[in-house]
C-alpha cells in the first residue's frame, strides 16, 4: 500500500512556514538546493553540478503543481521561506530554467551577499562554501528565527509516496539526509518542535489546488486560469519525487585489472577509489610488476618538502633534501627506456593541493613549471615514462576531499565490493555463503544509509590466518567468523551509522548488533542472509 501526507497535514505545514518573516529568503532557498547538490566547505565543485543535480531538491522545496498535473509555463514554484510575499513577487520563469541559469547567476554572477558565503575560482568555474558560511547565512536570513524542521520536512515531502507511515523523527531525518544538513546547520537554522503539527497520512496525493488557493494567485493571473484550470497529464511518474539513488551492483564485478591497465597506459595517472577492503592496493601492486616502483603513503603531516623538496633539520644542521616526486622523476628521466610507477596509498589523507604545490599543472603532462630548489629556480616536468596510481578510501569521513583541480587531472576508477569474488574464494563450515552475506549486508547498508561509499569490502573476508594452502581458499569456522564479524565488520557498520541503534537494527537486526556468540550467532546470521 502507498501512503501520502494528507492535505490537512500539508496545509498545516504551509501555515507554520507562512508565519516566518525572513530576510533575503532567496539566499536560504538556494542554499538548501546547493546543499542537496553536494556543495560544502571542503571541496571546490563545478557549477555544472547545479544544472545536473538541482532539479530534484528544487522540486521538493518549491513546486506548486503535483506530478498529476500539467504545470503552467510560469508561476509554477514558490520559496518555502517567503510564502507571504509570493503572490506579489512570484517568479514567472519555469523552475527548470531558474535552477539551470538563475541560481548560477545569483551565486557567481556578482550578488554581493554571496561573496560573503562562497569562495569561487573563476578559472575553473568551481566554488565551495566559506569556513563560516553557516553563521553568515544565519545572520543574513534568519537572525533570531529558527524554522520548524518538521514543517519544512512535511512541505518538502508533500508529493512523496511512502511504503509505510513515517514518524515525525523519520520525516525530519529524511529531509536532513536529502539536503545534507549538518549538526551545525541543524542547531543554527531549525527548531525541532512537534507541538504545532500532527503528521497525518492519506491513500492519495494531497490536494495541491487547495494549497494554491491558500497561497493566493499571482497578481497577473486569474483564479480560473492559475488555480483551477490545470489539465491532468495523461502520464506521470510519482517516483520522480523519491530518493533517486540507484543501488550499485556489488556483485560480478569485472576484473578491474582489465580496466586499470589500459587507462593507466593511456593517461599515465589514475586514482582507485572505493570503500575499504575492495582490493585497491592489491590492484596497484598487481600492476606494479611491470614497472620500477616507488610506493609511499600520504598522511596528514605529509608535506611539500617530503614530496617536492625543501630544507630539513638534520641534527644540528639544516640541509636541502629533494622530495620523492622530484627524485623519482629524475630517475625516470635518466632511464627513458624503462617505465616507472609511483603508488600513493591513501592519497586523500594529506592536503593534496599543498603537497603538489605548483607541480599540479605538470599533471597535465607536456607542461613545465619552475620550482625553487635550494636558492635557484629550476624547470620541472613529469617525464612521459613516469606513471602514478593513487588509492583512496571514500568511506572515511574524517578526511578531506581532493581539490577539483587535482581530481580532474586523474582518471578516476571506482572499485566496488565484489560479492562473487568472496563467494569464489571463501567457504564456511556452518553452511552460510560469504558472498550472499556480503550482498545482504551491502544491500541493507545502502537501503538504510543511501550512500554507496558506506559498504563492506570483500577483502575483509580474506584473512591469511584461515587460508587453506591445499584448497587455496579462506576456510571459515564458526568461531573464527564470529570474531571477524563481532570485532571487524560490526565496528565498521557502527562507524557508518555513527552508533544509531535504529539504523543498526535495520541493517543487522536487533540481535546481531549486540555481539552475540555461539549457536545464537550462527542462527541470526543465517536469518539475516535468508
Image (cartoon, rainbow, N blue to C red):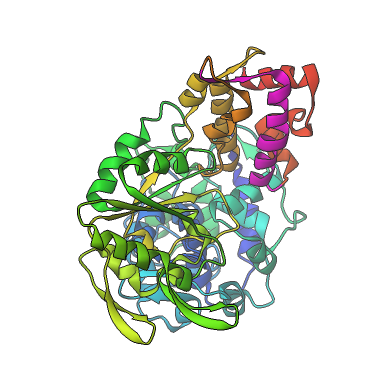
Snapshot quadrant of residue 369: bottom left
Specify the quadrant of the image occupied by residue 320. bottom left
Residue 150 locus on image (x, y percent): 67, 54
Depth order, front residue of 37/10: 37
**Residue furthest front as drawn:** 316
Q: Residue at x 59, y 72 (%)?
A: 134
Residue 488 lies in the magenta-colored region: yes
- Left-right relation of 414 to 452: left
**How would you classify the magenta stretch by its main secondary structure?**
helix
Q: Splitting the image into 4 quarters, where does residue 383 fall? A: bottom left
Q: Residue at x 46, y 23 (%)?
A: 420
Is there any visible trace of residue 221 in the rendered image? no
Q: Is residue 144 left or right of residue 271?
A: right
Residue 524 lies, with reference to residue 141, above or below; the image says above
Residue 237 rendering spot, x and y as whole percentages:
40, 37
In the picture, the quarter occupied by the N terminus is top right
Q: Position of residue 332 (x, y in %)?
A: 28, 59
- In the depicted view, which residue is nearer to us: 169 or 10? 169
Query: As rendered, which of 89 and 358 lies closer to the eye?
Result: 358
Residue drawn 74% across the image and 29% down it: 512
Say if the magenta span includes residue 1: no
> As drawn, which residue projects farthest toward the bottom?
375
Residue extent of the magenta highlight: 472-498
Q: Which residue lies at the image location 79% right of the left edge and 24% below the top edge?
A: 517
Q: Can see residue 313?
A: yes
Q: Position of residue 466 (x, y in %)?
A: 62, 24
Amino acid at each position: 500500500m502507498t501512503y501520502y501526507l494528507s492535505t490537512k497535514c500539508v496545509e498545516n505545514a504551509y501555515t507554520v512556514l507562512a508565519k516566518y518573516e525572513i530576510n533575503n529568503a532567496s539566499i536560504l532557498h538556494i542554499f538548501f538546493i546547493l546543499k542537496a547538490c553536494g556543495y560544502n566547505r571542503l571541496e571546490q565543485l563545478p557549477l555544472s553540478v547545479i544544472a545536473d543535480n538541482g532539479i530534484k531538491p528544487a522540486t521538493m522545496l518549491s513546486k506548486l503543481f503535483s506530478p498529476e498535473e500539467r504545470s503552467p509555463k510560469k508561476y509554477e514554484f514558490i520559496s518555502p521561506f517567503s510564502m507571504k510575499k509570493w503572490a506579489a513577487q512570484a517568479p514567472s520563469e519555469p523552475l527548470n530554467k531558474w535552477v539551470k541559469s538563475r541560481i548560477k547567476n545569483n551565486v557567481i554572477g556578482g550578488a554581493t551577499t554571496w561573496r560573503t558565503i562562497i569562495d569561487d575560482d573563476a578559472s575553473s568555474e568551481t566554488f565551495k562554501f566559506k569556513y563560516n558560511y553557516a553563521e553568515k547565512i544565519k545572520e543574513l536570513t534568519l537572525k533570531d528565527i529558527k524554522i520548524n524542521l518538521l514543517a519544512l520536512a512535511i512541505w518538502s515531502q508533500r508529493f512523496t509516496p511512502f511504503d509505510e507511515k513515517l514518524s515525525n523523527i523519520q520525516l525530519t531525518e529524511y529531509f536532513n539526509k536529502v539536503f545534507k544538513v549538518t549538526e551545525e546547520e541543524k542547531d543554527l537554522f531549525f527548531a525541532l518542535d512537534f507541538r504545532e503539527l500532527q503528521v497525518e497520512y492519506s491513500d492519495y496525493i494531497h490536494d495541491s489546488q487547495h494549497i494554491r488557493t491558500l497561497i493566493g494567485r499571482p497578481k497577473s493571473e486569474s483564479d480560473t486560469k492559475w488555480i483551477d484550470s490545470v489539465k491532468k497529464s495523461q502520464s506521470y511518474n510519482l517516483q520522480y519525487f523519491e530518493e533517486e539513488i540507484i543501488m550499485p551492483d556489488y556483485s560480478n564485478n569485472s576484473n578491474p585489472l582489465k580496466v586499470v591497465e589500459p587507462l593507466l597506459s593511456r593517461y599515465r595517472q589514475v586514482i582507485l577509489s572505493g570503500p575499504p577492503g575492495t582490493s585497491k592496493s592489491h590492484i596497484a601492486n598487481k600492476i606494479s610488476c611491470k614497472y620500477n616502483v616507488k610506493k609511499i603513503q600520504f598522511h596528514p603531516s605529509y608535506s611539500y618538502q617530503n614530496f617536492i623538496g625543501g630544507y630539513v633539520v638534520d641534527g644540528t644542521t639544516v640541509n636541502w633534501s629533494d622530495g620523492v616526486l622530484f627524485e623519482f622523476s629524475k630517475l625516470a628521466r635518466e632511464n627513458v627506456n624503462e617505465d616507472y610507477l609511483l603508488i600513493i596509498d591513501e592519497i586523500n589523507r594529506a592536503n593534496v593541493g599543498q603537497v603538489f604545490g605548483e607541480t599540479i599543472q605538470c599533471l597535465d603532462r607536456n607542461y613545465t613549471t619552475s620550482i625553487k630548489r635550494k636558492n635557484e629556480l629550476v624547470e620541472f616536468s613529469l617525464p612521459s615514462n613516469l606513471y602514478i596510481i593513487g588509492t583512496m578510501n571514500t568511506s572515511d569521513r574524517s578526511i578531506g576531499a581532493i581539490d577539483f583541480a587535482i581530481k580532474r587531472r586523474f582518471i578516476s576508477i571506482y572499485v566496488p565490493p565484489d560479492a562473487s569474488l568472496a563467494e569464489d574464494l571463501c567457504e564456511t563450515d556452518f553452511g552460510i555463503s560469504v558472498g550472499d552475506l556480503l550482498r545482504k549486508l551491502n544491500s541493507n547498508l545502502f537501503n538504510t544509509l543511501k550512500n554507496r561509499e558506506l559498504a563492506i569490502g570483500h577483502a575483509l573476508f580474506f584473512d591469511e590466518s584461515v587460508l587453506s594452502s591445499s584448497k587455496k581458499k579462506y576456510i571459515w569456522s564458526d568461531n573464527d567468523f564470529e570474531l571477524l564479524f563481532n570485532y571487524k565488520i560490526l565496528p565498521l557498520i557502527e562507524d557508518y551509522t555513527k552508533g544509531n541503534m535504529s539504523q543498526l537494527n535495520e541493517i543487522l537486526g536487533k540481535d546481531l548488533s549486540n555481539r552475540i556468540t555461539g549457536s545464537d550467532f550462527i542462527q541470526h546470521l543465517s536469518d539475516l542472509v535468508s
